[in-house]
Image: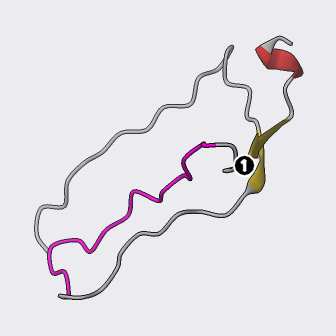
Amino acid sequence: MTPKNMHLFEACFDGGYAAFYNPGGPGRTPFEGVVYTSPGPADLEPVIIALDDPMRIDYTPAVSN
């Protein structure tokens, strides 16, 4: 199967595969005893084909917070 023919990605976490985790977090002021991430559920995710027009992001840190 070529990448352009893919439409869905099945994220399943059985058979020894580890779950996905959201990379979010507490920011600059975490609270003690609070869990900020947990394993995601099994899911079907749409595939975005960005081979011809790659999507890019940029990170600009906040000046003050």
Query: Which residue is found at the position 59% from the left and 23% from the top?
Result: 54
Quadrant where the C terminus sits is bottom left
For the view shown, which residue lies furthest in the left direction? 64
Q: Is residue 16 left or right of residue 27?
A: right
Identify the residue position indicated by label 1 in the image: 12
Quadrant location of residue 50? top right
Query: Which residue is found at the position 48% from the left and 57% from the top?
Result: 21
Magenta span: predominant SS is loop
Q: Position of residue 4 (x, y in %)?
A: 82, 17
Q: Is residue 25 above or below residue 44?
A: below
Q: Is residue 15 left or right of residue 34?
A: right
Numbered range of the magenta stretch: 16-31
Query: Which residue is found at the position 41% from the left and 69% from the top?
Result: 37
Is residue 27 inside the magenta stretch?
A: yes
Query: Which residue is found at the position 89% from the left and 20% from the top?
Result: 5
Three-letter code, disc 1:
Cys
Q: Position of residue 38 (x, y in %)?
A: 47, 69
Quadrant location of residue 63? bottom left
